[in-house]
């Protein structure tokens, strides 16, 4: 535990961050990474077919 605390202090010094906010952001990033990994795995198992895939061959049409 002490090693993690020291590592945290090196990465984000206490005077430059609030510990709870840092932890909150780390948890959000971990959840987002987990969700994206599951989504990638799902697409690898069952990729879109040609008909289901978006056609970006002329993406200029979609510019606002």
Image (cartoon, rainbow, N blue to C red):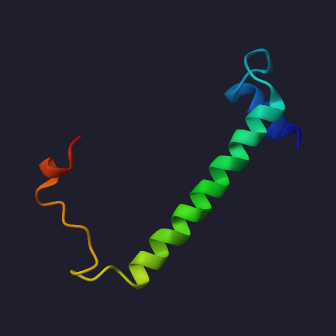
Question: From the image, which quarter does the N terminus lie in?
Answer: top right
Residue for point 66% across, 53% down: 30
Q: Quadrant of residue 25?
A: top right
Write the residue at 22% across / 81% down: 51
Q: Is residue 41 left or right of residue 18?
A: left
Residue found 32% across the figure and 79% down from its top: 48
Q: Position of residue 6 (x, y in %)?
A: 80, 31
Position of 46 with respect to 42 (left or right) is left
Q: Is residue 54 left or right of residue 22?
A: left
Picture layout, residue 38 above or below residue 33: below
Q: From the top left corner, tell me how far across and down residue 40 is, in percent.
A: 45, 70
Task: Name the residue located 63 percent from the left edge and 48 percent from the top edge.
Answer: 29
Q: Position of residue 59 (x, y in %)?
A: 16, 53
Up the image or down, 2 lies above or below 16; here it is below
The image quarter in which residue 21 lies: top right
Farthest front residue? 64
Q: Quadrant of the C terminus?
A: top left
Q: Viewer-proximal residue, 19 or 58?
A: 58
Q: Residue furthest top?
A: 15
Foreground pick, 15 / 45 = 45
Q: Quadrant of residue 15?
A: top right
């Amino acid at each position: 535990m002490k090693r993690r605390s020291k590592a945290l202090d090196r990465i984000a010094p206490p005077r430059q961050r609030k510990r709870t906010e840092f932890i909150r952001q780390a948890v959000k990033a971990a959840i987002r990474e987990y969700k994206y990994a599951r989504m990638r795995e799902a697409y690898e198992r069952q990729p879109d077919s040609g008909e289901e895939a978006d056609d970006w061959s002329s993406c200029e049409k979609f510019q606002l």
